[in-house]
């Protein structure tokens, strides 16, 4: 008697890894020490944004223009775009049973 055919399935992970607690604490400490100048970066770190580094760079280099600060804050507060994921489970057709 032949062993049963293996079952095939797929697993797709669509979430980002959890935010580092150390980065979040450092971001909020620096935001408070800079009198909320780095607030957009702290918000981005807390929300685990995919563009966290870009938000930090815009905030750090262009935040003094006030417009750059608001751009970074808006980027930090916008929701992440959702990527549709299609999972196709392929199961081979059953093999005929011969004696």
Image (spheres, rainbow, N blue to C red):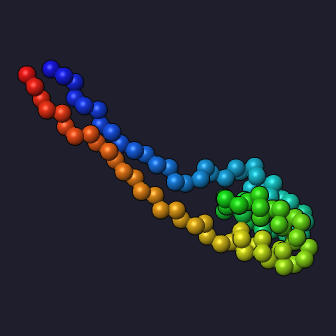
Residue 10's quadrant in the figure?
Answer: top left
- Percent across and percent down for residue 74 are 72, 75
Location of the N terminus by quadrant is top left
Residue at coordinates 40% horizontally, 52% vertically from top-left? 87
Residue 71 visible in the displayed image: yes
Left/right placement of residue 96 relative to residue 7 reads left
Say above or below: 24 vs 9: below
Residue at coordinates 67% horizontally, 59% vertically from top-left? 50
Left/right placement of residue 90 relative to residue 31 reads left
Q: Residue furthest toward the bottom?
A: 67
Left/right placement of residue 64 relative to residue 86 reads right
Say above or below: 70 vs 22: below
Residue at coordinates 73% horizontally, 66% vertically from top-left? 43
Q: Nearer the viewer, residue 44 or 53?
A: 53
Please give the count of numbered marks on the rendered protein.
0
Residue at coordinates 87% horizontally, 71% vertically from top-left? 63
Residue 31 visible in the displayed image: no
- Percent across and percent down for residue 82 are 53, 65
Location of the C terminus by quadrant is top left
- Percent across and percent down for residue 40 are 78, 68
Left/right placement of residue 36 relative to residue 76 reads right
- Percent across and percent down for residue 5 are 25, 31
């Amino acid at each position: 008697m032949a062993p049963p055919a293996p079952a095939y399935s797929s697993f797709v992970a669509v979430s980002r890894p959890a935010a580092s607690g150390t980065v979040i604490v450092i971001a909020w400490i620096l935001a408070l020490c800079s009198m909320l100048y780095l607030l957009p970066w702290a918000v981005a770190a807390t929300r685990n944004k995919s563009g966290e580094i870009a938000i930090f760079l815009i905030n750090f280099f262009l935040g003094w223009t006030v417009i750059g600060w608001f751009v970074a804050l808006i980027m930090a507060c916008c929701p992440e775009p959702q990527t549709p994921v299609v999972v196709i489970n392929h199961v081979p057709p059953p093999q005929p049973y011969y004696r």
